[in-house]
Image (spheres, rainbow, N blue to C red):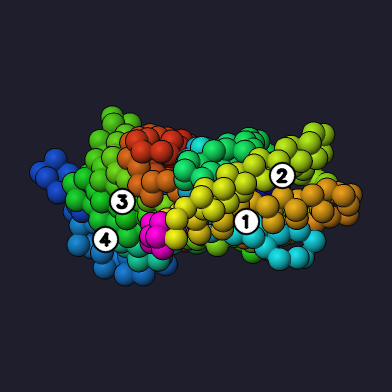
Amino acid sequence: MYTIKLFLLILLFAGVQTFGQVYTDKIIGEKNEALRDSLETHQYPYSLPIWGEKVARKGYELPYSAGISVNYFWQKSDLIINNLNVGFNNGPQYNLDQIVRFNSAVSEANSVNIRPDIWLLPFLNVYGIFGKAKTSTAINAGIWVPDADNNWTEIVSFGTKANFDATTMGIGFTPTIGIGGGWLALDMNVSWTDISALEKPAVTFVFGPRLGKSFKLNKPQSSVAIWAGAFRVHLKSGTSGSLNLADVLPLDGAQAKVDNGFVKVADNQTKVDDWWNGLSNKDKANPSNIAKYSTANKALETAGNFLTAVDGALSTAGTSTVQYSLEKAPADMWNFILGAQYQYSKHIMLRAEYGFLGSRDQFLTGLQYRFGI
């Protein structure tokens, strides 16, 4: 039963958000008349974005068409685990949803990623994501079984934390619009994160709408921007894999806890059977009593079968393997974000962003360099 914790540790939840606050801005206002006139009369010198010259001649100031940024991202989030199935040595897997309860499942990630990008269209930025992450998942859970009165009690509790290294690749798109320094951006990306213990990479979808305002400084081409928005993560829920039991299961005391679990299951089964056998035929025909009896027996049978499988795996712990599958999702898909950026020039920008509210906290900072192509 303690190997359940192994499968909950393999939960990378590091949605990569790499939006950089640059945008195509419609120049308005009398004080910006000279800039607008220069844009309308000068030849646009770069190949990208497509239709860049046409847009510039209409009074839009475009950022440099290509860039590369380095970003650090930290995130801590609560997770929800469902449809947990566990088996040993390629034998049958047991669905443990009925008997396993999670007090907490928290994922934390620290990642560094590189993001090359281009402005494909004047109002559409396209970028790639290449990153390395260190992640950890801490869980606290227990195995619960019912008694004759349908009161559920915890027969075993466990908690643990493990660390993993991961590699992430992804692609993103950011449609934007800017007028007079105010702007709206709708950042979205999909990333694939590879962990050796997983059969398939974890797939994460991120959507981040932002509304902001840029303020020009006295230094030419320099500005400060602030924004507020939201951060939505959808983590593709299916996860499965196989691991060596000896690599993850603390063997000290495990057999004693399994034996104690057998005793508690047997005691509860006796209580349930005594309660049922003490009912009259009329009470046994009562649908509520039938449902209670069936639910208790099913939970106790699952717990007993699973303990038997764990017991067998412990007898050959050095060569035993554990197979698992589960579905996972963030406890809250949305949280709120605030951000700011200092633009030293049209080439160099430094930004920071913090996300909070709900069950997720996150922080991002990045340095960006832009150039024309």
- Residue 296 position, x and y percent, is 53, 52
Which residue is drawn at the image coordinates 30% and 36% (left, top)?
226
Give the structural element (helix, strand or loop) at label 2. helix
Query: Which residue has dot 3 on it?
Result: 209
Please say if the residues under marks 4 and 2 sit with CB atoms less than 8 Å apart: no
How far apart in space, not on screen, are marks 4 and 2 (Cα)?
Answer: 75 Å
* Kind of residue at disc 2: Phe
- Residue 159 position, x and y percent, is 63, 35
Magenta stretch? 282-288
Q: Residues within 10 Å of mark 1 (few under 14, many from 20)?
A: some
How far apart in space, not on screen, are marks 3 and 1 (Cα)?
Answer: 45 Å
How far apart in space, not on screen, are marks 2 and 3 (Cα)?
Answer: 52 Å
Query: Which residue has dot 2 on it?
Result: 262
Q: Is residue 361 left or right of residue 184?
A: right
Decide which of tag 2 and tag 3 comes sooner along the chain. 3
Is residue 266 depicted above or below 306 in this figure?
A: above
Decide which of tag 4 and tag 3 comes sooner along the chain. 4
Query: Which residue has dot 4 on it?
Result: 56
Please say if the residues under marks 2 and 3 sit with CB atoms less than 8 Å apart: no
Query: Which residue has dot 1 on it?
Result: 302
Q: Is residue 34 left or right of residue 238?
A: left
Which residue is drawn at the image coordinates 80% and 61% (left, top)?
89
Give the structural element (helix, strand or loop) at label 1. helix
Q: Residues within 10 Å of mark 2 (few under 14, many from 20)?
A: some
Decide which of tag 3 and tag 1 comes sooner along the chain. 3
Q: Is residue 223 magenta?
A: no
